[in-house]
Image (cartoon, coloured by chain):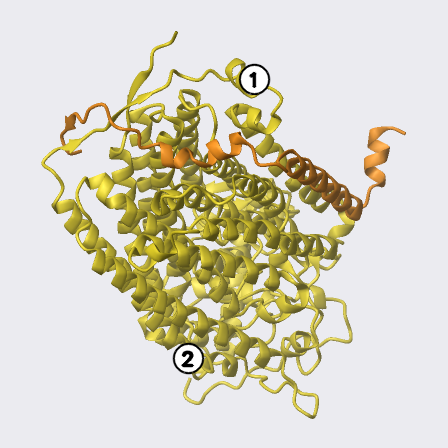
Chain colours: A orange, B yellow
Amino acid sequence: MRLSELVSNLTPTTYSQLALLIFLGVFIAIAWRHRRLTTAHTEAAALPLADDAAPLARPEVPHE
Amino acid sequence: MTQPDTLRYDDAIVRKFVAATIFWGTIGMLVGLYVALQLAVPQLNVAPYLTFGRLRPLHTNAVIFAFAGNALFGAVYYSTQRLVKARPLSDLLSKIHFWGWQLIIASAAITLPLGYTEGKEYAELEWPIDIAIAGVWVVFAVNFFGMLRNRREQHLYVAVWFYIATIITVAILHIFNSLAVPWSPLKSYSLYAGVEDAFMQWWYGHNAVAFFLTTPFLGLMYYFLPKAAEKPVFSYRLSILHFWSLVFIYIWAGPHHLHYTALPQWAATLGMLFSVMLWMPSWGGMINGLLTLRGAWNRVAADPVLKFFVVGITFYGMSTFEGPMMSIRSVNALSHYTDWNIAHVHGGALGWVGFMVFGMTYWLAPRLYQTKLWSTKLATVHFWVATIGIALYVVAMWAAGITQGLMWRAFDDTGRLQYPDFLETVTRLMPMYWVRALGGTLYISGILMAAYNLFKTWQTRPATYAEVEVEVPPRVRDGATAKAEHHGHWHRKYEGLPATFSVLVAVAVIVASLFEIVPTFLIKSNVPRIATVKPYTPLELYGRDIYIREGCYNCHSQMVRPFVDETVRYGLGGVPTEYSKPGEFVYDHPFQWGSRRIGPDLAREGGRRDEYWHLRHFDNPRSTSKGSIMPRYPHLLRDDIDYGSIQARINAMVTLGVPYGADAKRDAAAMARAQAEEVAAKLVKLGGPAGKTHKDVIALIAYMQRLGVDIRAGRNDLPEAAPAAPTPAGK
């Protein structure tokens, strides 16, 4: 069967079902991959708290 | 070994965006209060450019694109620099971005009151401004992705993913929904018509809420909440699921705005299902936010920043519960076209977006101005006043929405509509409108306190700002480094590759969109043609453009839903009408289905009343409809029809595929003049004034009298027109 024939035989319901399956697959893959807490997760979560490293200098600039 | 580098953050651009946020927020909310008062006191519609229909889009555009827009840009520039350890690509691009966006807002503030609108909610701005928006958005994207390219931190933190999704998706939505054929330097017609236009508009409209008012503010939450709480996000793994689920599911939900309309049922059902599924990621995100405060709840009592964040995130949870609930078909049957929608959007806008912005602003102020916040006490007062304001606003609009929805569908014991006069269902809402205005006033007094507090803080800034210089690791090169550092950990690997990550986001959004858009546009059975439906005459088209210019769609729908109460209410001569069919709208560029009924539906208006009634109604609605809150339009009786512009309008419609005949293509103006003379003659015959033949009102009346007429053509069982309304003595 050619692709064009396949597509023309699909109903809107089939598109929706297919999309739901794709989403479910991606969701399960991501959930499975991240099922265990790793050091990488802990490090990543701490990034906002690590962004105020001690400044080297505070050069002064005129007001914009 | 590579030596560490140094970096200076660009906080000047953040200061600019934060100041613009508060400035435009104040303006946008004041306009909102004014339009709210216009519903309670219609005499406040004092001039053509200050009517509800023209100001309401100004309010929505100002609070969405000016207030929320400037806030999200400020949040993105502040947090991303620190998260990826890089400056934006170019200071010049940052300036072009800032000033370009302010110019766009100023253009909107001028053109919308002047009546230049595309007539599509939240996408009203005309084509030259749309092009400018696309241009400035590209500048923002180049500046942002250039910053990621130059980054010194390998991992892209979850907030940055939300920013990436925002930039990519908003670009896609804006471009495809704004496609139009211009017919003058400031006017155009939508490329799509009827059902397809409605679908595209709400695909855009819903996802503008998702990707302009939700994802960037979730990014803001994931960065600023841990900063304020001094705790890492509760679960980074949950944030990953939150992100991908939200991005994939949100894009499907738009059709829930079109339940029971002429949109095919399969599309509306799909929108409903995905809306209900949205509960999962939305509440996952809310829980992740609130649990980030574990061990820090004692600080919430003393810190206004945390107060704003906690209540903001709670409103996110409430709104994302209410939205899916309202998308359920049976609930939507009651809530749609009522003030319940207004309650819902303001719970999200004032509670979620507003409070996250204020929390961020109060947290940023001491850091940006390098001094203490002028008054923590005033910020706390702001919090309480605004919270009470939202509560009053939302409860009043819930009450108004449910009241009106129930009144519309009420039948008495004899099987007749209990409230057949639509006006009864409007005047009943007046107490709720006053409570809403009070709530809005409190909320606005809060932003005025914020403006004063920030101004006083700014006044105590140091003579010169100290620009922070930090030590950063060497620049990260995409590809090799990412693969080496994260070998075997596929998601982290892609997080380290902004280009690949962005493509994945785009694929998620585009695939989901195409699954709905392709069948809607390509399956012809979605829009069965109706042989009697013909294009508007040149004069009717001109009248329709006046309808769009005056923003009539802000108060009137053109969609009779398949409910008995609606077919009876909008029936003619005691005979129920047909509900609206997809084929009726094939020449409607743009569609005008509306989303709120402050006034009655107009889909079957043609022939219900005579020409003179319409003229008096436009001149002063209260002369024909006691208690009406519609603005007066006396300028329509004064302003001349611009016959010279009609041919360009017809030519644009022909370009869009509307099948006009040879006469219209050759001399549309002459056709319009001839029809205007017929309408004016009928008006005089009914006792109306002479000398109105070439006035705007004649074109608008012609359009009104055409609405819903085509579907009655050839039907012997339906009356052609209602008996003429009695003319008042002395007129």
For mark 2, name the chain. Answer: B
In terms of depth relative to the viewer, which is nearer, B293 or B243? B293
Q: Are marks 2 and 1 on the same chain?
A: yes
Asked whether disc 2 touches disc 1, contact meaning CB atoms under 8 Å apart, the reply is no
Picture layout, residue B725 above or below residue B290: below
- Is disc 1 placed on a helix, strand or loop? helix
Residue where numbered disc 1 is placed = B483
Residue where numbered disc 2 is placed = B430
Residue B354 pos. (x, y %): 37, 55
Picture layout, residue B539 above or below residue A55: below
Q: Residue at x 61, y 73 (%)?
A: B607
Labels 2 and 1: the sequence-earlier one = 2
In terms of depth relative to the viewer, which is nearer, B606 or B72? B72
- Which residue ends up furthest to the left in the rendered image? B463
- Which residue ends up furthest to the top in the rendered image? B1
Number of other residues with Cα within 10 Å of mark 2, as a class: few under 14, some 14 to 19, many 20 or more: some
Amino acid marked by disc 1: Lys
Residue A30 pos. (x, y %): 64, 36
